[in-house]
Every structure is written in C-alpha cells, then in structure tokens.
C-alpha cells in the first residue's frame, strides 16, 4: 500500500465531497473560478482512486499537472478574496463574483483556501510518489 497515493486520493475525495456539499446542501452557487477548480479536482478523485486500487505509481505523470494547475487557480482565487487591491483584476464578470466569501471560518479560511490546501496536499503526495523507487 502506498501511503502518499492513498493520502492524495483521500484529499481529492474529501475536496470533491465538500464542494458538492457546499453547492447541493448549502446551496452556495459556484463562481467561475470555483468551476475551474472543480474541473481540475473532480477527475483527480476518480483517477487517484483507480490508481490507488491498481497501485499505479506512474499516475503522477497525469495527475500532477492537474494538481499544480489547481494550486494556481485556487491560490489566485484566495488572493482575490483576501487582497482588496486584486479585486480590480477579477475575471468573474457575470453571475457570482469570485471575490464573494460564502464562509470565512476563523477570519481566514474560505472555500478557495480549502481547495488550495487540498491541491497542495495532492501535489506534495504526488511529488513524493514520483521520487519513490520500487
């Protein structure tokens, strides 16, 4: 059993379930950047699960680019919410503004920040996986 692969799959699964909870149960409408993060996270939950089941240590080749891009998008989204100056560069021009905070736990934990943490966990685990020799 590969622990880094298991942890990366678990992080993707929790992030996917969490985003579905926020939209389907709490009825938070996703903004454009949230949709981009979902587009990058949801496939990770599936392919990392399959890779864990098959003990595919080469999955980092396909999953790492998704996780890195997800870190960039969620990092930008987090900064957009937390740094007022950046809101003038907001790319969400219709629908829900990307700078809107649906929740702000402890004064700093937002949905994009949670996505950033999940993408970071996945990235670190996949980087570790890419360096293991078996």
Image: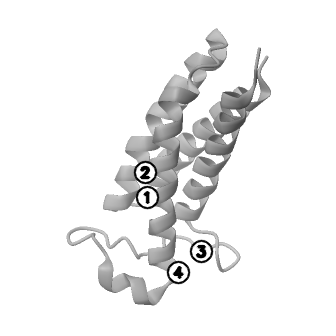
**Which circle's residue, 2 or 4, is located before the other in the chain?**
2
Q: Position of residue 29 (x, y in %)?
A: 36, 60
Q: Which residue is mark 3?
A: 104
Pointer 2: what residue? 37
Q: Nearer the viewer, residue 81 or 122?
A: 122
Which label's residue is closer to the chain start, 3 or 4? 4
- In this view, the residue in front, 16 or 90, is 90
- Specify which label sits upstream in the sequence, 3 or 1: 1
Query: Where the N terminus falls, by quadrant?
Result: top right
- First in residue order: circle 1 vs circle 2: 2
Q: Are marks 3 and 4 in contact (CB under 8 Å)?
A: no
For label 1, the crowd category at 10 Å Cα-Cα, with few meaning under 14, some 14 to 19 and many 20 or more, is many
Of badges 3 and 4, nearer the viewer stands: 4
Task: Measure the C-alpha gap from mark 3 to mark 4.
Answer: 10 Å
Which x, y percent locates residue 122? 63, 41
Instruction: Quadrant for the C terminus, please.
Output: top right
Residue marked by disc 1 = 73
């Amino acid at each position: 059993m590969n622990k880094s692969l298991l942890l990366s799959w678990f992080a993707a699964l929790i992030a996917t379930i969490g985003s579905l909870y926020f939209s389907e149960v709490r009825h938070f409408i996703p903004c454009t950047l949230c949709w981009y993060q979902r587009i990058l996270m949801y496939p990770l939950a599936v392919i990392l699960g399959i890779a864990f089941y098959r003990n595919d240590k080469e999955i980092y080749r396909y999953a790492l680019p998704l996780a890195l891009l997800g870190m960039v998008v969620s990092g930008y989204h987090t900064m957009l919410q937390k740094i007022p100056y950046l809101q003038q560069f907001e790319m969400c021009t219709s629908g829900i503004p990307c700078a809107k905070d649906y929740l702000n736990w402890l004064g700093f934990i937002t949905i994009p920040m949670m996505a950033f943490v999940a993408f970071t966990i996945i990235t670190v685990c996949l980087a570790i996986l890419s360096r293991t020799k078996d």
